[in-house]
């Protein structure tokens, strides 16, 4: 799933344009962004791009600072292979 600081309407438009087929949650108050370190303050306009791998124990198994969104899937797959989540 993805989480954005945008509202439902903006997320819907983004998902339709990009063909995003996964749930896209709204974090307009920045609560999740602050809790996960993707925002420094509630005034941040955009979240930092992080990918979190959540393990079966519901803990963060890994956090990836997503520098290259196109390579993200490969990075996550390699990581999952190494840590066996």
Image (cartoon, rainbow, N blue to C red):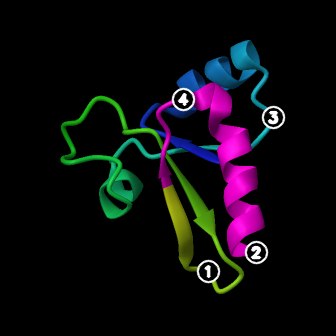
Which numbered disc flags the more N-terminal residue, 1 or 3?
Answer: 3
Residue behind mark 2? 84
Distance, label 4 to label 1, CA atoms, is 26 Å
Residue 17 found in image quarter:
top right
Distance, label 3 to label 4, CA atoms, is 20 Å
Dot 2: within a 10 Å radius of its alpha carbon, few (fewer than 14), some, or many (20 or more) residues?
few
Vertical placement of 60 versus 34: above or below? below
| Disc 3, SS | loop
Which numbered disc flags the more N-terminal residue, 3 or 4?
Answer: 3
Vertical placement of 57 versus 34: above or below? below
| Disc 1, SS | loop
Q: Nearer the viewer, residue 27 or 9?
A: 27
Residue behind mark 4? 68
Which numbered disc flags the more N-terminal residue, 3 or 2?
Answer: 3
Specify the segment rendered in magenta: 64-85
Q: Position of residue 3 (x, y in %)?
A: 54, 45
Which numbered disc flags the more N-terminal residue, 2 or 4?
Answer: 4
Residue 54 found in image quarter:
bottom right
The residue depicted at 50 percent of the width and 52 percent of the height is: 64
Q: Position of residue 33 (x, y in %)?
A: 37, 51
Vertical placement of 36 versus 56: above or below? above
């Amino acid at each position: 799933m993805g989480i954005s600081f945008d509202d439902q309407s903006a997320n819907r438009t983004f998902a339709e344009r990009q063909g995003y087929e996964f749930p896209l949650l709204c974090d307009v108050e920045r609560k999740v962004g602050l809790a996960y370190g993707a925002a420094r303050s509630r005034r941040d306009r955009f979240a930092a791009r992080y990918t979190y791998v959540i393990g079966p124990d519901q803990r963060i198994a890994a956090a990836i600072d997503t520098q290259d969104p196109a390579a993200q899937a490969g990075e996550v797959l390699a990581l999952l292979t190494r840590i066996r989540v």
